[in-house]
Image (tube, grey):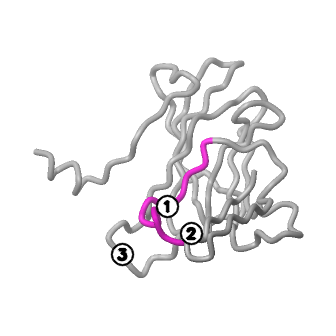
Amino acid sequence: MERIEINLKAKTVTRRPVSPRCLEFAVINPAYAGKKTKYLYAAEGWPFASAGLVKVDLSLSTANSDDCVVASRLYGPDCYGSEPFFVAREPNNPAAEEDDGYLVTYVHNENTNETKFLVMDAKSPSLKIVASVKLPQRVPYGFHGLFVKEDDLNKLQ
């Protein structure tokens, strides 16, 4: 994975390595969309597709860095996840730190045919699981979704 910076004033493009790992479905705290962001979260595709989740510290990205991953979690043998989402712990708190929230995703176990909805602490170095909910149905791989805050949902009514 690489970080690409486009400087419109200087008319330059800079590429910097972020991680040699196979990462996909990268997301950030949505409150930082269009702003300078320090962290991104991505599904790790090694040893198999979406076998885990990583937290990347983009501030560590330099021409000499080789891996900016600062936290990770593998889902376990024959368990594969979907696209992660970042959910702020306090969405209406402008003083909250960028990584103060949760990562949510679906994980399917190929051996038991169970799908779980996982909630992980985004600040934890191990991306600690704080909630795991067994779902009544299998969620297909590649399933995309969207997290909508209750306040925003109520505005639609």
Outermost residue to the front? 11
Residues at circles 3 and 2 in contact by the CB criterion of under 8 Å: no
Q: Residue at x 72, y 44 (%)?
A: 23
Residue in front for this viewpoint, 67 or 130: 67
Q: Type of residue at label 1?
A: Asn
Q: Which mark is residue 93?
A: 3
Q: Quadrant of residue 115?
A: top right
Q: Which mark is residue 29?
A: 1
Give the residues in magenta.
25-36
Query: 10 Å neighbourhood of mark 3: few (<14), some, or many (≥20)?
Result: few
Residues at circles 2 and 1 in contact by the CB criterion of under 8 Å: yes
Q: Type of residue at label 3?
A: Asn
Q: Residue at x 38, y 68 (%)?
A: 90
Provide the residue designation for mark 2.
Answer: 37
Q: Earlier in the sequence, mark 3 or mark 2?
A: 2
Quadrant containing the C terminus in the rendered view:
top left
Please, what secondary structure does the residue beneath circle 2 have?
loop
Residues at circles 3 and 1 in contact by the CB criterion of under 8 Å: no
The picture places residue 21, in percent across and down from the top left corner, at 81, 47
